[in-house]
Image: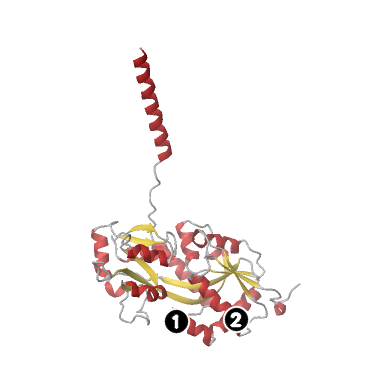
């Protein structure tokens, strides 16, 4: 039997429930590289990308993994939104929280030729003409919830949501005129802003240091705060000593100059939470979703049965006409 002092004796797998090359994958690889280069763990970190269904396929794999500390999950606030939206029947309470290692701000943006010059102006329009402005998003994911927090922050304002996918796809839809607005992480906006975008607001409590001239939503009379916290989770029942091992490992990793500099470059606030403060953070972020009302589109009519019925009616009419002619 492996004792706490001996753990780990084999490589540790981190499940990233998104494709390689995305924001979450990039973040974990920063930790993987730093842990290796600074010899912070006796065993290597192995990344396993299990993409699909907005992160729920990968989180399900982590949920079902053996709780021995050799498989953990990296997943931001998508662990809340998937459950809240009904895309998953598991959530934070079904895992052992390990740590939170950074916060991403959210920028609300429109195309450069948009008539809207401020978030206040746009939200007034969304209230006066509900469901007319199209918000490009990833349905059920945190980006979708950024929009729903905006709606909540301006009672009566309503967007029409369309499925666009990740940041690059949202950018393409925005530039193509297919959507009126969308949300990007601060890092994504930093990358995309040269492509003639206009940022209207950040959804942080305070202005982001990367864009000190960009006002918050609250400054524009829209009571909306939202962002992404980067979380690490273990399967339920993972021994406390192994949770403690990862807490210490991630703390030491966060303290390195390498990680601090990379987080600064990615405009990720270097917040770090474990133990009691982590549980309070999780509790608060879960509670924030309680006031969000989900308006799912009505089910599509049974078109296939309608077509079959129409074909049957046409067939009967043809048959009756043939009978008449034969007489």
Q: Quadrant of residue 295?
A: bottom left
Q: Which mark is residue 265?
A: 1
Local SS, label 1: helix
Residue at figure coordinates x 48%, y 71% from the top left: 23
Q: Which quadrant would the N terminus be assigned to in this image? A: bottom right
Mark 2 burial class by Cα count in 10 Å: few <14, some 14-19, many 20+: many
Q: Residue at x 67, y 73 (%)?
A: 11
Provide residue 106's location: percent of width, then percent of height.
Answer: 39, 72
Q: Is residue 73 above or below residue 5?
A: above
Q: Tell me the tag on residue 35.
A: 2
Q: Residue at image x 34%, y 64%?
A: 174
Q: How many marks?
A: 2
For the residue labelled by badge 2, is the local secondary structure a helix, a strand or a loop? helix
Badge 1 density bin: few <14, some 14–19, many ≥20, Cα 10 Å? few
Asked which quadrant contains residue 204, the reply is: bottom left
Q: Is residue 47 depicted above or below 157 in this figure? A: below
Q: Is residue 213 visible?
A: yes
Position of residue 277 in the picture relative to residue 43 (left or right): left
Q: Quadrant of residue 197?
A: bottom left
């Amino acid at each position: 039997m492996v004792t706490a002092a001996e753990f780990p004796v084999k490589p540790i797998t981190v499940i990233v429930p998104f494709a390689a090359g995305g924001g979450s994958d990039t973040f974990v690889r920063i930790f993987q590289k730093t842990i290796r280069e600074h010899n912070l763990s006796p065993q290597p970190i192995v990344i396993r990308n299990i993409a699909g269904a907005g992160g729920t396929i990968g989180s399900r794999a982590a949920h079902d993994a053996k709780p021995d500390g050799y498989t953990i999950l990296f997943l931001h606030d998508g662990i809340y939104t998937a459950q809240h939206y009904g895309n998953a029947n598991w959530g934070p309470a079904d895992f052992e929280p390990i740590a939170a290692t950074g916060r991403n701000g959210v920028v609300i943006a429109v195309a450069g030729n948009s008539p809207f010059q401020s978030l206040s102006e746009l939200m007034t329009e969304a209230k006066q003409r509900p469901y007319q402005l199209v918000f490009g998003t990833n349905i059920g994911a945190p980006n979708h919830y950024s929009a729903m927090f905006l709606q909540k922050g301006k009672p009566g304002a309503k967007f029409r949501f369309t499925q666009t996918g990740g940041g690059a796809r949202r950018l393409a839809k925005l530039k193509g005129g297919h959507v009126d607005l969308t949300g990007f992480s601060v890092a994504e906006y930093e990358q995309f802003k040269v492509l003639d975008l206009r940022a209207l607001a950040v959804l942080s409590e305070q202005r982001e240091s990367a864009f000190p001239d960009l006002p918050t939503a609250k400054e524009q009379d829209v009571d909306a705060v939202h962002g992404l916290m980067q979380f690490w989770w273990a399967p339920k029942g993972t021994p406390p000593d192994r949770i403690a091992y990862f807490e210490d490992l991630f703390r030491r990793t966060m303290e390195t100059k390498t990680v601090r500099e990379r987080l600064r470059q990615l405009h990720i606030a270097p917040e770090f939470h474990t133990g009691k403060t982590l549980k309070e953070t999780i509790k608060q972020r879960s509670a924030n979703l309680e006031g969000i009302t989900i308006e799912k589109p009505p089910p599509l009519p049974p078109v296939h049965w309608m077509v079959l019925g129409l074909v049957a009616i046409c067939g009967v009419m043809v048959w009756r006409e043939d009978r008449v002619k034969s007489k």
